[in-house]
Image (cartoon, rainbow, N blue to C red):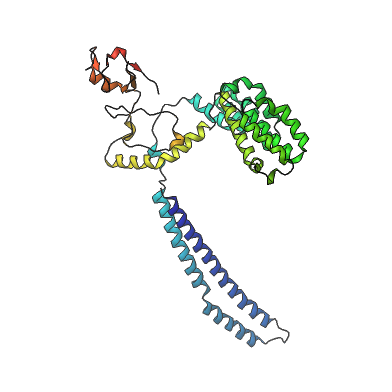
Amino acid sequence: MELSSIKDAFDRVAKKQKLSSSKSQEVVDQVGREIEQALATIQSPHDPSILDQKSILTELKSKLNAIGALQQLEGSHKEWNQSLSKYQKLLEKLFNPDISKAYRNVDFDTHIINQIIASHFYRQGLSDLGDSIINEAGEPEATALRSQFLEMHKIIEAMRGRNIQPALSWVTANQERLAKIGSNLELKIHTLQFVDVLQTGTRADALKYARTYLSPFASINKDEFQKLMGCLLYAGRLANSPYSELISSTHWEMTTEELARQFCTLMGQSYESPLSMAVAAGVAGLPTLLKLANVMAAKKQEWQEMKQLPVPVDLGKEFQFHSIFVCPVSRDQGSDENPPMLLPCSHVLCKQSIAKLSKNSTRTFKCPYCPAEATVAHCRQLYF
C-alpha cells in the first residue's frame, strides 16, 4: 500500500480545488463589479431617463455575456471534479473497502476480550469509559486493575508537573520489588530534582540535597554520582557547563516513561496496551491477508479453513514477543500440532520429525546433529 502515491494524489486534488476556488471567486468579483458599476450609473444624481437606463442595462447584459461567467465556473469545476474522481478511484484501488474477507472465525473468550477492552481504557486513564464497559458486560472482576492504573496516572501527571513526591512514595513502597528487577528509578528521580535545585537554588541547597538523597547511591552508581557532584561547580549556570544536557526536558520524559514501564511490570502487565497492539498488528497485516483472500478465492479455495497461512505476514520486530521455532530437519514452523521437542542431547526437533526418525515406534534413533541416541519417551515437549 503506497501511502506516498495517495498523498501525491491528494495534493493534486487540493491544488485543483484551490485553483478552481480562486478562478470562481475572480469571475464572481468581475460580475459583481459590472453590476455595481451599472447601479452606480443608474443611481447617479443627474436622473437618467428611462431610455438611458435601458441602454445601461443592455450594455450590462452585453458585458456579462462577454464574461461568460457560467461557462467559466462550469469549466473550473469540471476540471476539479475530474481530479476528484481520479482520486476516489485510486483510494478504491489501494484501500479495499470490504475487509471482511480477511476475517476468520475464532472462538474468543468473551470474558478476556471484555477485560482487555476495559483495561485499555483504565490504562489510558479513562476510568469512566472502563467502568461503562465493565457495567455493560457484567465483568466486575476486571475492576481489579482500575485502582492501580489510576494511581499510575496520578503519579505520571505529577511528574509532568515536575512534582516527584508521588513517584518517590511509590518507589519507596516498592523498593524491594524494584531492586529485584535491577531498577535504578529512585536515583533517576532524585537526579531530576537535584538538577532542578542546582538551577533554581544555591550551591548549598544542592549539596544538602545530594547528601540527603544521593549519597546512598554513591557506592553503587559511582560514575553517575561523580558526574552529579561535578555539577555543583556550575550551580546557577548549568546551561553553560559540560553537563548542560542534564537540564533537557527529555530526561523528565524518559524517566516518566520508565516509571510507567516499571509500574506495569510490577502489576504483571505489559507497558503497551494489548488492545492497541492487536489493532496495530491487524492494520499492518491486513493488506497481505486481503491479497491472500483474493488469490485463494480466485483458486476457489477456502483459506479460512487452513490451519497455517501459506505466506508469511511480516509485522516487524515491535510485534514479536515470542520466539518462532523452525525445525532444522523439516523446515516446518512449530505449531500446537507439531511442537518443538527437546532431545536428551539438548538439540531440538519438531514432533513430526522425531516421529519419522523413530518410525513411530519405541526404537532408538540417532540425533541428526550429534552421535547421541534417544527414544520418543526421552524427548520432552517445549512450550513457546
- Residue at the image position 33 percent from the left and 40 percent from the top: 292
**Where does the image place residue 113, in percent across and percent down from the top left?**
50, 28
32 is higher (above) or lower (below) than 259: below
Relative to 164, residue 85 above or below: below
Q: Position of residue 294 (x, y in %)?
A: 33, 42
In the depicted structure, whether residue 352 falls above or below residue 124: above
Residue 80 location in percent, x, y? 47, 63
Quarter of the image where one finds residue 333? top left
103 or 7, which lies in front?
7
Q: Is residue 206 visible?
A: yes
Q: Residue at x 51, y 76 (%)?
A: 68
Q: 76 left or right of 144?
A: left
Q: Nearer the viewer, residue 290 or 342?
A: 342
Q: Is residue 150 visible?
A: no
Q: How many marks?
A: 0
Q: Quadrant of the C terminus?
A: top left
The one of 195 and 116 positioned closer to us in this rendering: 195
**Coordinates of residue 206 in the picture (x, y in percent):** 74, 34
375 over 279 or under it: above or below = above
Residue sitting at 65 percent across and 33 percent down? 226
